Amino acid sequence: MYKVSIIGASGTVGRYAALAISRIPNVREIVLFGRSSSQAMLESIARDLLDSFAATGIPTKVSWSSAAESLADSKIVIITAGVPRKQGQDRLDLAYQNAEIVAQYAKEIVCVAPKALIMVVSNPVDVMTSVALASSGKDPHHVFGLGTHLDSMRLKSLIADHYQVHVSEVHTRIIGEHGESMVPLWSATTIGGIQLSHFYEFEAPNLPFLLETVKKTGQMIIEGRGATEWGPGEAIATIVRVILGNENRILTLSAYVSREINGMGGVCIGIPVLIHKQGVHPVAIHIEEDEANAFRDSIARVKAVTEEIMMLLKEKEVL
């Protein structure tokens, strides 16, 4: 049985993630963590969760705190804190606002919960994962971000809908930036283990349109209801379930890649990783030339912002 802590749990993603994580059988305790000014909100969320547990028979313990000591003994600490993306705002525009927040929390985590895995959700998630890694000083296997996991699931759902098959039959993934330069691996996309090009009786999907739909989905949700919530919340819970269950699955998360993808890397970005209780391990793969070129561009885009943010944090003596 494990303890999972959520920093920034008063936000829409954090509080729904808490509900989704509570359904995982081997979670014994959830800590809702936030600033002192958000404690009344966190207490309300905790009590609401406990009411739902009473109705469903879930035995999970829930607490709320603004004291770093409450994170001690956590198996996973999830950072969702930061300024949320606003309508029309690029994820990379958030980098300057959120970097100091993530850096400070990463330092606190490593002091009170040195063995905890750190999962970053705050946007832009690739850059913030690098910030958390540098600030914490932890092993790269122990710090990772939500990355393109949700993007990959969105693409998977769109393909399943086009071919009218159960979503579990579709295997696909998106690598690179969680943003405009994301890269779909069409060469690795299959339905029931069969390449898309082999389905002769079906009209081929408009692949560029599917990708654009994936890119725009988050913004469409923000425009319609103010924030994304259920999708990222369930995606976070899936990752937690895989770790605590030691499932050894391959997911596409933001992690530090050195040279595992066609010899490219040097930054935290969305890549296939093997994930289990000990953390994440990049999977070395070879991708097609057009995909490699797009991935190279995505790395350059993320790396440029990451280096700029790191320089700013050093100038301000945050790192």
Image (cartoon, rainbow, N blue to C red):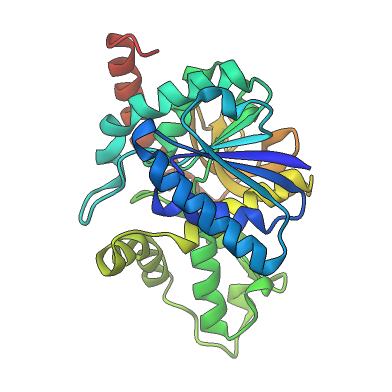
Give the x, y percent position of residue 293.
Answer: 43, 44
Q: Report how many numbered discs are placed on residues in the image.
A: 0
Q: Residue at x 27, y 32 (%)?
A: 97
Q: Is residue 114 left or right of residue 306?
A: right
For the C terminus, give its image quadrant. top left
Q: Nearer the viewer, residue 290 or 222?
A: 222
Question: Picture quarter containing residue 199?
Answer: bottom right
Q: Residue furthest left?
A: 88
Give the x, y percent position of residue 304.
Answer: 32, 29
Q: Is residue 269 left or right of residue 227?
A: right
For the N terminus, give its image quadrant. top right
Q: Is residue 43 above or below residue 156?
A: above
Is any part of residue 206 visible from this angle?
yes
Q: Residue at x 38, y 31 (%)?
A: 36
Q: Residue at x 63, y 23 (%)?
A: 113
Is any part of residue 172 visible from this angle?
no
Give the x, y percent position of residue 202.
Answer: 56, 88
Q: Residue at x 49, y 24 (%)?
A: 106
Q: Is residue 52 left or right of residue 29?
A: left
Q: Nearer the viewer, residue 293 or 63?
A: 63
Give the x, y percent position of residue 306.
Answer: 36, 27
